[in-house]
Image (spheres, rainbow, N blue to C red):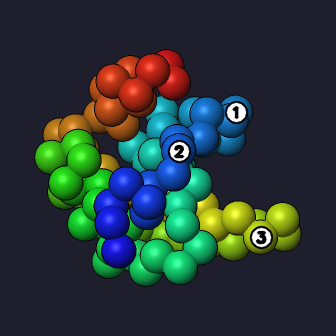
Amino acid sequence: MEESIILKCPLSTEKSIRLMEAENKLVFLVSRKSTKIEIKKAFEEMFKIKPTQVNTLITPKGKKKAFIKLPMDQPAIDVATKLGIM
């Protein structure tokens, strides 16, 4: 699967920004068929940062969200600033 299809777009909701500040996590909408390993690999290739953990969730609307936890030496806010969501 191609990595540009796996990570669709970052979410910048109130909850995702709170997670970014408190737990150093980023939230992305991802392809419904992608696995946690594929999401981790795509994120690593795109941002050159190795995530420590990836959790996924399928919303009631049928969209899949990935909660990507970053290492403590890589602030999630810095990545969000590069993406233009902060």
Q: Residues within 10 Å of mark 1 (few under 14, many from 20)?
A: few
In the figure, residue 1 lies in which quadrant? bottom left
| Res 11 quadrant in image | top right
Residue beneath the point at 23% across and 43% down: 47
Closer to the observer: label 1 or label 3? 3
Mark 1 sits on what residue?
Answer: 14
Q: Which residue is mark 3?
A: 62
Horizontal and vertical percent for residue 70?
30, 50
Q: Left or right of 65: which side holds 21?
A: left
The kind of residue tagged 1 is: Glu
- Dot 1 falls on a residue whose secondary structure is helix
Three-letter amino acid code of the residue under disc 3: Gly
In the rendered view, would you say 9 is above or below 5?
A: above
Mark 2 lies on residue: 9
Of label 2 and label 3, which has the lower sequence position?
2
The Cα–Cα distance between marks 1 and 3, rounded to whole angstroms, is 21 Å
Question: Mark number for residue 59?
Answer: none
Q: Residue at x 46, y 46 (%)?
A: 26
| Labels 1 and 3 touching (C-beta < 8 A) | no
| Residue ID at (63%, 66%) | 64
Q: How far, Cα to Cα, is label 2 from label 3? A: 16 Å
Residue 66's place in the image compared with 13, above or below, is: below
**In contact (CB < 8 Å): disc 1 and disc 2:** no
Mark yes or no: residue 7 visible: yes
Q: How far, Cα to Cα, is label 1 from label 2?
A: 16 Å
Q: Is residue 38 above or below residue 9?
A: below
| Secondary element at image label 3 | loop
Badge 2 density bin: few <14, some 14–19, many ≥20, Cα 10 Å: some
